[in-house]
Amino acid sequence: MSLFFVLGATILIAAGTWQYLRYLRVRRERLEDRQPSFYPRESFHTVTFLKVADSLGREGEFEALRQLRRAIEAPGGGRVVYAGLVAVNMAASTRLPNDWSALVLAQYPSQDGFERQREGTELGQVLDGCERSYVHGFRRPAITNLLIPLALGGLRVRDILLRRKSILPFEPLALEDAVPPIQAKRKEILALEDYRDIRDDAILVVNLILPGTADQQAADRAYSGAMLRGMAEGGYGPMHMGRAVSVEGEHNYKQFVAVYYPGIDYMHAMIGSTFINRVGPGKQLGDTLAVATIPVLAKLGG
């Protein structure tokens, strides 16, 4: 009995390690994400949205990100863990502007450390140089984020054992047969094509989330459950998750989630599928800002 127990435990540990390293490889190689796996409990994270003047073009967006990275990583500051160009607005907020050019995720030793840097001149000068900016904080528990890949692996094992029908590959649906909101979104994500020259195999959808009413939350749980099944099957999904913390204005978002999708072609296939046409209308929130971003941290130098 003890031999079987040891063998079973060894297999579980090996499988869990493989699953975690699989997702870590995606973070490092595709998303160019430098988030440490382990860090002190008092660490504090921020997401900074930037709107750069359209007249400055793509190079203006890159330069704004370079300047923001230098300001954040100044001595005594934080570290940038992800940078992306905003390609498409996936869900429009009623509380915040929806037109953004780029964003940065950063980690600080503490919220006090972030506030001290925010009161300085360098970070303020960078943000003032943009048309518009917005910063929101979030608490990203290390243990929660370490367990996400394992939870997705367990979900996939459950589906296999229960012989549930696979979600992948997606079954395509003609545009005219899709419900109107999905038809509109299929047209909007054509904007992703403008970013193929930068990276076409990774998209990070960054979400600020305010849950809705009890009925909306029930509908959203059904939507999220179906989406998580697809993520578990396809080896993608949440890379950053935490409790939102307001540091600017009075916006009371409750959650921050950043979800990896395996590229532009995958996004077209998913949004153009019978699957998303069926489950997509179930996504119901009190408010959310969700933007699809293309990873560019490796292109910022430093």
Image (spheres, helix red, strand yellow):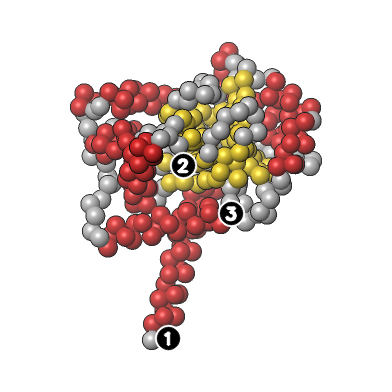
Q: Is residue 236 left or right of residue 158?
A: right
Up/down of 142 relative to 241, above or below: below
Can residue 82 be seen at all in this image of the molecule? Answer: no
Q: Specify the quadrant of the image occupied by residue 10.
A: bottom left
Q: Which residue is mark 1?
A: 2
Q: Is residue 262 left or right of residue 82?
A: left
Q: Residue at x 42, y 29 (%)?
A: 90
Up/down of 53 relative to 284, above or below: above
Q: Residues within 10 Å of mark 3 (few under 14, many from 20)?
A: some
Q: Which residue is mark 3?
A: 142
The picture places residue 78, in percent across and down from the top left corner, at 71, 42
Mark 3 is on which residue type?
Ala
Which residue reaches farthest top? 55
Residue placed most toward the observer, 241 or 246? 246
Q: Quadrant of the C terminus?
A: top right
Q: Quadrant of the N terminus?
A: bottom left
Front tag of 3 and 2 = 3
Q: Specify the quadrant of the image occupied by residue 73.
A: top right
Q: Residue at x 25, y 27 (%)?
A: 179
Q: Specify the quadrant of the image occupied by residue 263.
A: top left
Q: Is residue 76 left or right of residue 166?
A: right
The picture places residue 148, in percent across and down from the top left corner, at 47, 54
Q: Upstream in the sequence, badge 3 or badge 2?
A: 3
Q: Upstream in the sequence, badge 3 or badge 1?
A: 1
Helix, strand or loop status at disc 1:
helix
Q: Residues within 10 Å of mark 2 (few under 14, many from 20)?
A: some
Mark 2 is on which residue type?
Val
Mark drawn on residue 259: 2
Mark 1 is on which residue type?
Ser
Q: Is residue 158 left or right of residue 195?
A: left
Q: Residue at x 74, y 36 (%)?
A: 115
